[in-house]
Image (cartoon, helix red, strand yellow):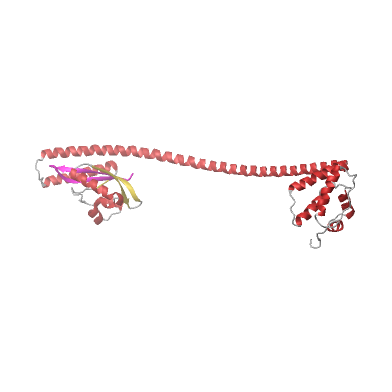
């Protein structure tokens, strides 16, 4: 608005016959227009309105039926850098409606009806937008629920499958456990029989040193005991001296652990015990040999095919004339 210079605007005096409502409205309207600093002619050139209508608005002879004229004046003031608050806009609008109601009652009713219609249309559109938003949310929730139900059905099927599989495995393991306990009981009974037999032989042979025939009898007894235990419980059996040194090869054991013959004869079965458990196992094994006690132990053992697995180890000392002749450790299949 460089061509619009701020200069005083000369407006004709107001007629004293105007109603108080119209007088109040026109006074405020003229103050807002005068603050623009432009003439009626320039305003008419800048906007699609003739200067006669502008003159009638500013003289109070005609009250605008809509807010167009007031909105243009306030827009020009805002464009020139002056702030117009909402309170000022509402005050001017109320003055215009009061003047319109007195000056033009019919047009006032039309204006009120139009304003109410505009408000109703606005509210209707807002309600439509709100309903559309709710519809979108409902569709999203419905799709989400369908996805959750589908996933729940899938998980239920998977759960039923896993449950049936676990029940089957539990039944199979329960049956195997019962068989294993039965075999263990039979083996223990056989060990007790062998111990009683050895005690009887010891009573019958008081010779402390023992003869070559005794050693042969011991070896036969070892073979019988180990063969019986291996058959009774599917155990892997090996024989060691009282010092824990392997007396002979144990092919079944080496087939499980992958030990070579030299490695087995050198380190015996302890060579494949898990490093974290080896020291404790060696200590317990040494203590059992010193005290001539039955050795029972659970430890992790390295296998050829699948890393470390748990084995139950049981060793029975063979005593002749108060001296330990050998031990027969047995290691059942891993549990």
The mark tally for this picture is: 0
Residue shown at 83% from the left, 51% from the top:
30
Viewed as shown, does residue 147 lie left or right of 306?
right
Is residue 134 visible to us here? yes
Residue shown at 45% from the left, 39% from the top:
164
Overall secondary structure of the magenta section: strand
Q: Quadrant of residue 258?
A: bottom left
Viewer-proximal residue among 122 and 189? 122
Viewed as shown, does residue 146 lie left or right of 328?
right
Viewer-proximal residue among 194 and 16? 16
Residue 202, percent across and down?
Answer: 13, 40
Viewed as shown, does residue 205 lie left or right of 1?
left
Residue 94, percent across and down?
Answer: 80, 44
Looking at the figure, which quarter contains the C terminus?
Answer: top left
Residue 70 colored magenta?
Answer: no
Q: Residue furthest left?
A: 207
Residue 162, percent across and down?
Answer: 46, 42
Q: Quadrant of residue 297?
A: top left
Residue shown at 16% from the left, 40% from the top:
198
Span of residues in magenta: 313-335
Viewer-proximal residue among 206 and 32? 32
Q: Residue furthest bottom?
A: 3
Residue 27, percent across and down?
Answer: 83, 48
Looking at the figure, which quarter contains the N terminus?
Answer: bottom right
Is residue 250 visible to us here? no
Residue 329 colored magenta?
Answer: yes
């Amino acid at each position: 608005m460089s061509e619009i210079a701020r200069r005083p605007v000369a407006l004709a005096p107001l007629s004293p016959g105007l109603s108080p409502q119209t007088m109040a409205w026109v006074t405020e309207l003229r103050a807002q227009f005068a603050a623009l600093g432009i003439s009626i002619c320039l305003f008419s050139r800048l906007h699609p309105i003739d200067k006669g209508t502008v003159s009638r608005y500013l003289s109070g002879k005609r009250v605008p039926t809509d807010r167009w004229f007031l909105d243009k004046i306030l827009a020009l003031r805002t464009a020139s850098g002056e702030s117009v608050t909402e309170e000022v806009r509402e005050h001017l609008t109320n003055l215009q409606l009061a003047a319109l109601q007195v000056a033009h009652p019919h047009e006032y009713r039309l204006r009120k009806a139009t304003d109410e219609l505009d408000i109703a249309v606005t509210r209707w559109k807002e309600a439509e937008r709100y309903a559309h938003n709710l519809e979108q949310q409902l569709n999203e929730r419905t799709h989400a629920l369908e996805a959750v139900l589908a996933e729940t059905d899938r998980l239920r099927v998977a759960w039923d499958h896993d449950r049936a599989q676990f029940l089957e495995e539990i039944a199979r393991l329960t049956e195997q456990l019962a068989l294993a306990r039965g075999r263990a009981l039979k083996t223990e009974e056989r060990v007790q029989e062998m111990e009683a037999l050895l005690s009887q032989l010891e009573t019958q042979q008081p010779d402390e040193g023992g003869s070559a025939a005794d050693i042969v009898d011991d070896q036969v007894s070892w073979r019988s005991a180990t063969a019986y235990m291996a058959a009774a419980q599917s155990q892997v059996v090996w024989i060691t001296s009282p010092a824990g040194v392997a007396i002979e090869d144990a092919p079944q054991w080496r087939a499980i652990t992958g030990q070579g013959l030299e490695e087995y004869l050198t380190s015996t079965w302890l060579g494949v015990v898990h490093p974290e458990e080896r020291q404790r196992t060696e200590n317990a094994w040494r203590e059992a040999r010193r005290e001539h006690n039955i050795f029972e132990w659970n430890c992790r053992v390295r296998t050829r095919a699948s890393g470390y697995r748990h084995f139950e180890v049981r060793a029975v000392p063979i005593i002749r004339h108060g001296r330990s002749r050998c031990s027969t450790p047995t290691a059942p299949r891993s549990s």
